[in-house]
Amino acid sequence: MPPSIIISCILVSISLAGGQILFKLAALDIVKYKALGVASVFTPWLAAALMVYAFSTALWVWVLMHAPVSKAYPFVLLAVPLVPLASYWLFSEALNMKYAIGLGLIIFGLFLIQSD
């Protein structure tokens, strides 16, 4: 795949991971608002997450116009380690060694799939 497509695939993965973090922030806000007696599920974090996902979707469609899905889709797996790492740093969520090994295997698998 050309470098522009690979970079776009990586950007899709990063934006998907970022969207998940924004969804988590929206969920935390919704819980906070509910505790205050406010009946709102729409928060700025949710709006940002939806915008990031709209961007991801548009970029993904562009990628699929220029690359086979069998080569592009494995890049989505990059979001898998990004989300837990971000949740560890941002929300102090626990990660263990088994988890780290599994993430390493996913990344190794991506490299195997892409090497032709």
Image (spheres, rainbow, N blue to C red):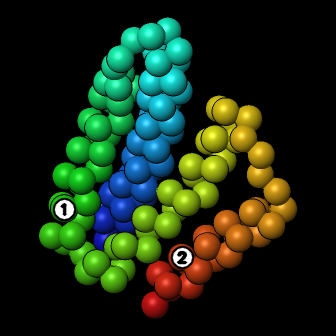
Residue under label 1: 61
Point 63% across, 41% down: residue: 87
* Residue 18 visible in the picture: no
Most foreground residue, 101 or 10: 101
Q: How far apart are marks 2 and 1 (CA)?
A: 21 Å
* Residue 107 visible in the picture: yes
| Residue 47 vertical position relative to residue 58 in the rendered view, above or below | above
Q: Where is residue 88 in the image (x, y as percent from the top left)?
A: 70, 41
Q: In which quarter of the image is residue 38?
A: top left
**Amino acid type of the residue that numbered disc 1 sits on in the rendered structure:** Val
Q: Quadrant of residue 109?
A: bottom right
In this rendering, would 51 be left or right of 18? left
Q: Position of residue 19 (x, y in %)?
A: 41, 42
Q: Which residue lies furthest to the right in this view?
A: 97
Point 33% across, 83% down: residue: 70
Point 44% across, 29% down: residue: 26
In this rendering, would 43 be left or right of 65? right
Q: Which mark is residue 110?
A: 2
Q: Position of residue 104 (x, y in %)?
A: 70, 69
Point 77% across, 46% down: residue: 94
For label 1, the SS is helix
Q: Quadrant of residue 66?
A: bottom left
Q: Which residue lies furthest to the bottom in this view?
A: 116
| Residue 99 vertical position relative to residue 53 in the rendered view, above or below | below
